[in-house]
Image (spheres, helix red, strand yellow):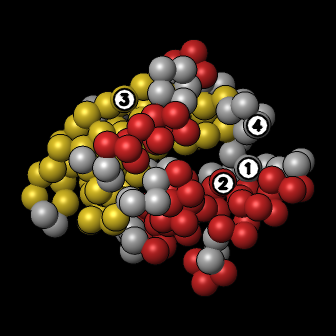
Amino acid sequence: MLYFAYGSNLLEERLKLHVPDARFVAVGRLPGWRRMFHLRSQDGSAKCDLVRCPDESSPIEGALYECSAKGREALDVWEGLGSMYRLEEVRIESELGEQMAFFYAGSESFVDPERRPYDWYLASIVAGARRHRLTEETLASLSSVPSWNDPDSERSFRNWKLIPANLR
């Protein structure tokens, strides 16, 4: 099954912590959605989300990963399926043609526009976008998102270690 990663799971090192058998397939584009950083997380920060935006002309870019049923179950738990996130199945455009894929979209009850992502979280998304050679428009958009320093220095250190230096 194909998984469309648009947030921190763009960075393969992060995704493989939870889904070791994930395999990158192609860069994908999803029209009619917009990337937002507005989901209230347990760690006090904002996490990434996709919201429907039919008037949006630029598609969201992300990575398509193949994963097993066991990997999908692990992702469901990690992403908080049924609470923080709900499942969406969509057609993704890629160099392989249109593909059906799933992704996690935020639950409205977790939306908090006052939150910001932590710097390491945003950096992992930017690093994944660089690795997969997403467009300059996507990189500029991601790089313009304001972030906060994580007050938990151990968590911050652990997460910064996952991001290859050449992708920061």
* Furthest-bottom residue in this view: 166
Q: Nearer the viewer, mark 1 or mark 3?
A: 3
Residue at horizontal 47 percent and vertical 41 percent from the top: 74
Vertical relation: 82 (above or below) 28: above
Local crowd at mark 4 within 10 Å, few (<14), some, or many (≥20)?
Answer: few
Whether residues under marks 4 and 1 lie with C-beta atoms below 8 angstroms apart, the answer is yes
> Could you say whether the residue bearing mark 3 is in a helix, strand or loop?
strand
Q: Earlier in the sequence, mark 4 or mark 1?
A: 4
Where residue 117 appears, as percent x and y from the top left, is 69, 45
Given the image, on which type of amino acid does mark 4 rest?
Answer: Asp
Would residue 152 be found to the left or right of residue 129 on screen? right
Find disc 3 in the rendering and name its residue: 87
Given the image, on which type of amino acid does mark 2 rest?
Answer: Tyr
Find disc 1 in the rendering and name its residue: 118
Given the image, on which type of amino acid does mark 1 rest?
Answer: Tyr
Q: Earlier in the sequence, mark 1 or mark 3?
A: 3
Would residue 16 be found to the left or right of residue 51 on screen? right
> Could you say whether the residue bearing mark 1 is in a helix, strand or loop?
loop
